[in-house]
Amino acid sequence: MLIVDYGAGNLTSVYNALKFLGIDGEISNKPRNIERAGKIIFPGVGAAGAAMENLNKTGIGEAVRNAVKKGTPVLGICIGCQIILESSEEDGGVPCLGILEGKAVRFKNEPNLKIPHIGWNQVNFIKEHPIFKGIPSGSNFYFVHSYYPNLDKGNIYGTSVYGSQTFPCLIGKDNLIAAQFHLEKSGDFGLKMLDNFAKLI
């Protein structure tokens, strides 16, 4: 299992979660290794602008795009769920990888609603996927974000609610699946989701 290193953090916690599950993980920033990997985790925390700058400068972004095109199973986490879209509103507007049609948008301000959204929240599955096997819809996962993916309903696998806003938090298409929440920080259900991804054929 290859964990993509493009300078966007939280790699060690993902690596340690895989290790706990008995899954061999490798952290790499080499485009060639990414394109050759059997399965890829594309994690990240931080801002879209800096993330895309690193991805474009290093060739890692193109390698991730090529891996998805080739049919390699890819799991995006947190900002890895946003920058797979065409663009993000963050940092004044950032062109992203364009693997899925859509845009990362900021939560709308509401009275008494804290942005960023930090903490545990229910995730409701609206479409089946093998990565959810053994996990009840409505289970809680851990979030830290101000932006979320806004895209066609056909590519939404799960949603959550913050304030009065229902937002997509599990998205994907074919061999690509991505979670806005942190699987590696979401207890037993987060680990179960990682394990299910590792077992995908």
Image: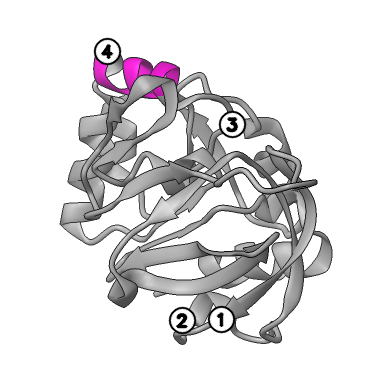
Please tell me which residue lies in front, 93 or 197: 93
Location of residue 127 by image quarter? bottom left
Residue under numbered circle 4: 57
3D distance between C-alphas at marks 1 and 2: 9 Å
Q: Are marks 1 and 2 in contact (CB under 8 Å)?
A: yes
- Residue at 33% x, 74% y is 153
> Which portion, as a residue range, is magenta?
49-57
Element class at badge 3: loop
- To which residue does mark 1 refer? 125
Q: Secondary structure at mark 2?
A: loop
Q: Are marks 4 and 3 in contact (CB under 8 Å)?
A: no
Dot 3 corresponds to which residue?
45
Q: Give the crowd class for mark 4: few <14, some 14-19, many >=20 residues within 10 Å.
A: few
Above or below, 119 relative to 28? below
Tell me which label, 3 or 2, sits earlier in the chain. Answer: 3
Q: Of label 4 and label 2, which has the lower sequence position?
A: 4
Pointer 2 residue: 129
Can residue 193 be seen in the rendering of this structure?
A: yes
